[in-house]
Image: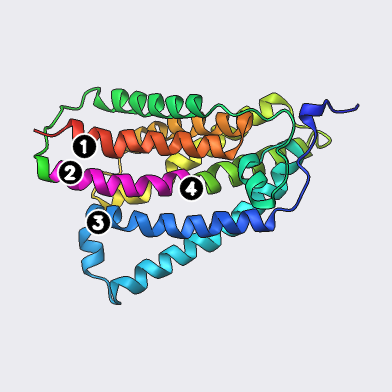
């Protein structure tokens, strides 16, 4: 059966584009450092080596991981049109693939709305606490820098790699032809793993290891993951990155400022 023009696989190289994701991942991880230092001050205070060594090693590790997983995601997703079409056009100086449309405003709005849904659910049964202005401003600028990590590193790992991997595996069982339900399953699985990936940081802050709290963290983060994953499927990685970035701006910048006493 011949594929329709909009279903043609992505053609072209991936290594240079993956390298760009790796460099961006390194910088985004460095930008995350102030947020982590405020979130886990005791852990950083007890480091056995200089702080700059640890931060540099973390950034380099994240960059290499983004490069490798980014390349794998681009390779595995190419047959199923899971790609970063706008970055590809810029990196390789080639015309954008026919049939690709941009919906940047939609990605930004959906990202912000998903964050508001998370906030609304999180406030159920949780009392609202005002924060003093100094603490709120400090949290906001750290959260603003951390938002680049979510939009770049987490989307490269959890959307570009994981969604592409799951779709590739599911399609392999069906003569390499991906069906719509396969994308949906892949998006949900990747979103749940994305949510579970936030548990170590939550535990580091002293959160109780109860099933209810664990499920709450996984599901709340999965809300953003499902939205980003759907945008990745329909419009490309860049839309998922923008949505995630906007969601984090609401959660980590707008929310602390709204809590100012």
Marks 3/2: CA distance?
Answer: 18 Å
- The numbered mark at residue 137 is 2
Given residues 87 and 231, the one toward you in this image is 87
Residue 54 position by quadrant? bottom left
Marks 4/2: CA distance?
Answer: 24 Å
- In the rendered structure, are the residues bearing label 3 and label 2 in contact, judged by CB atoms less than 8 Å apart? no
- In the rendered structure, are the residues bearing label 1 and label 3 in contact, judged by CB atoms less than 8 Å apart? no
Marks 1/3: CA distance?
Answer: 18 Å
Whole-percent x, y for residue 196 in the image: 43, 43
Residue 249 position by quadrant? top left
Q: Compared with residue 53, is residue 222 higher up or lower down, i.e. above or below?
A: above
Q: Which residue is mark 4?
A: 152
Residue shown at 28% from the left, 76% from the top: 48
Whole-percent x, y for residue 55 in the image: 36, 66
Residue shown at 20% from the left, 62% from the top: 42
Would you say residue 146 sits in the magenta stretch? yes
Whole-percent x, y for residue 207 in the image: 25, 45
In the rendered image, is residue 230 in sight? Answer: yes
Dominant secondary structure (helix, strand or loop) of the stretch shown in magenta: helix
- In the rendered structure, are the residues bearing label 1 and label 2 in contact, judged by CB atoms less than 8 Å apart? yes
Outermost residue toward the right in this view: 1
The mark that comes first in sequence, 1 or 3, is 3
The mark that comes first in sequence, 3 or 2, is 3
Q: Which residue is mark 1?
A: 256
The mark that comes first in sequence, 4 or 2, is 2
Given residues 89 and 141, the one toward you in this image is 89
Q: Which residue is mark 3?
A: 40
The mark that comes first in sequence, 1 or 2, is 2
Label 2 neighbourhood size at 10 Å, few (<14), some (14-19), many (20+)?
A: some
- In the rendered structure, are the residues bearing label 4 and label 1 in contact, judged by CB atoms less than 8 Å apart? no
């Amino acid at each position: 059966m011949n594929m329709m023009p909009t279903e043609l696989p992505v053609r072209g190289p991936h290594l240079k584009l993956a390298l760009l994701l790796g460099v961006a991942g390194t910088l985004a991880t460095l930008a995350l450092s102030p947020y982590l230092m405020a979130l886990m001050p005791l852990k950083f205070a007890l480091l056995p080596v200089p702080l700059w060594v640890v931060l540099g090693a973390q950034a380099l590790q994240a960059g290499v991981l983004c490069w490798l997983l980014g390349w794998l995601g681009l390779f595995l997703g190419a047959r199923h049109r899971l790609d970063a079409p706008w970055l590809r056009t810029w990196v390789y100086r080639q015309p954008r693939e026919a049939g690709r449309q941009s919906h940047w405003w939609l990605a930004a709005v959906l990202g912000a709305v998903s964050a508001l849904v998370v906030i609304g659910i999180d406030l159920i049964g949780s009392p609202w606490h005002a924060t003093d202005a100094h603490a709120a401003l400090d949290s906001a600028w750290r959260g603003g820098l951390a938002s680049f990590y979510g939009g770049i590193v987490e989307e490269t790992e959890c959307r570009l790699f994981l969604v592409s991997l799951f779709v590739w595996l599911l399609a392999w069982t069906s003569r390499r032809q991906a069906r719509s339900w396969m994308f949906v399953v892949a998006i949900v699985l990747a979103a749940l793993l994305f949510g579970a990936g936030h548990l170590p940081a939550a535990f580091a802050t002293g959160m109780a290891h109860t099933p209810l709290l664990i499920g709450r963290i996984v599901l709340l983060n999965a809300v953003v993951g499902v939205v980003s994953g759907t945008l990745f499927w329909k419009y490309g990685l860049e839309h998922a990155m923008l949505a995630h970035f906007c969601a984090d701006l609401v959660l980590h910048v707008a929310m602390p400022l709204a809590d100012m006493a």
